[in-house]
Image (cartoon, helix red, strand yellow):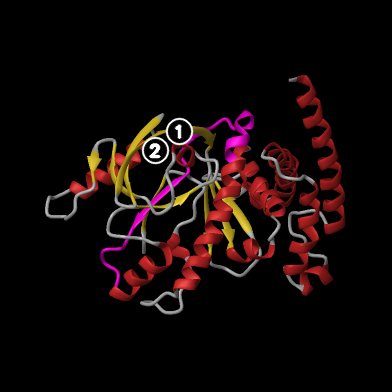
Amino acid sequence: MIKTFCAVAAFVMLAHAPVLAADAPSPDALRAWHKRELRVAGIMHKLRLANLASCPKQELDYGLVVARLADRASPAVRTTQAEALGLRDYPTALGVIPGSAAEQAGLREGDLIEAVGGIAWPLTDAVPDARKAFWEALNAGIQAPTMEIRAEREGQTRDFHLTGKAACIASLFMINRSSVNASTFGSRIQVNSGLEALLQDDAELAFVLAHELAHVILEHTGPGKEAEIKDPAVRRRIEMEADTLGVLLMARAGFATAAAAASIPRMRKANGMMSRLLGIYGPYMSTDERMVFLTKRADEVRVQMAGEAQGR
C-alpha cells in the first residue's frame, strides 16, 4: 500500500488499484489506474469549489496528494511504484489537481517534498517519531489557511506558498469493481471503476458525481438514517432531490447540463438486460421518465444561470 496523505478530499486511495499478483502489480495497470483516479478527482474538485453557495459544510482544499514508496512492500512492489508513478523514499507530489491551490503555487507532480511548515523529512528513521512529525505537519498544513512547502525539482530546492481554497466537504473513493454504480454515506462518496470506465464523457460523469454530492449537501444519508432510506417513498424522494440539485451543481462547475439525461440510458443499458426487461428501476424513475425530468431540469438551470449572469 502506498501511504497517501491527501490535501484534496476528492482523491482516490491507490490501495484500490488493480494488480496482476499480490507482490507484483503491473506498472501499466498502476499508471492507468492513477490516471483514472486523477480524472475523477479533477471533476469532483471542480464541483466542490464551484458550489460553495449550496454547501453548509466547507473545508479548505489544496489539490495536492503526497505519497512515498511503501517501507514494508516487497522489492518488486517498490520497483513498480517507482517505475509507474515516480515515487521515491522521499515524500513525492503524486497528484497536483488542475486549477488547485497547489498548481497555482507552482508545484508539479514528481516534486520531492523536503519540508512542510519548517518540519523537514528525515533522511533516515533513526530519530523516533521524526517522520511522524512530518506527516502531522502536512495534515496540520491542509487544515490551515496557508501552507509552506519546500520541494526539490531537478536538483534544485524551491519554496512554495500555498493558499487553501474553500470547498464543499466530501471525500471520494474509486473502488475496483466492474459494476456500474456510485453511492454515498454521510460525506463519503464511493464510485465503482466500472462506472468511471463507462462514462468517458466528463460531463456525464460529472452529473453522477454531482448527484452524489447533492446527497452529501442535503444530508440524505449517514449514521441514524439507514432505516429511513429503506422506505421506498423516502428513497424515491431523495433521489429526485439529488437529481434536481445535481444538475445545478454540474452547471455551476461548467459542465453541459444536457449530459445528465444522456448518461441515464447508457447506465441503464450497462446494468443488465434482466433489469431492463423486468422494468426494475429501484428507487429511480423509469429511464424515459428520468430523461424527461432531467431534460426539463437542464432547461430550467440554463435559464437560471443566464439570469444570474445578467444580474451580475
Q: Residues within 10 Å of mark 2 (few under 14, many from 20)?
A: many
**Which residue is painted at 50% across and 71% down in the image?**
29
Q: Is residue 299 left or right of residue 18?
A: right
| Mark drawn on residue 164 | 1
Q: Is residue 111 left or right of residue 62?
A: left
Foreground of the two, 115 or 216: 115
Foreground of the two, 94 or 187: 94
Foreground of the two, 157 or 232: 157
Say whether marks 2 and 1 touch (CB < 8 Å). yes
Q: Which residues are magenta?
A: 48-74
Name which residue type carries label 2: Ile
| Mark drawn on residue 142 | 2
Q: Is residue 117 left or right of residue 42?
A: left
| Mark drawn on residue 13 | none
Name which residue type carries label 1: Gly
Is residue 172 on the magenta stretch?
Answer: no
Q: Looking at the figure, which quarter contains the C terminus?
A: top right
User: Where 155 sits versus 28, above or below?
Assistant: above
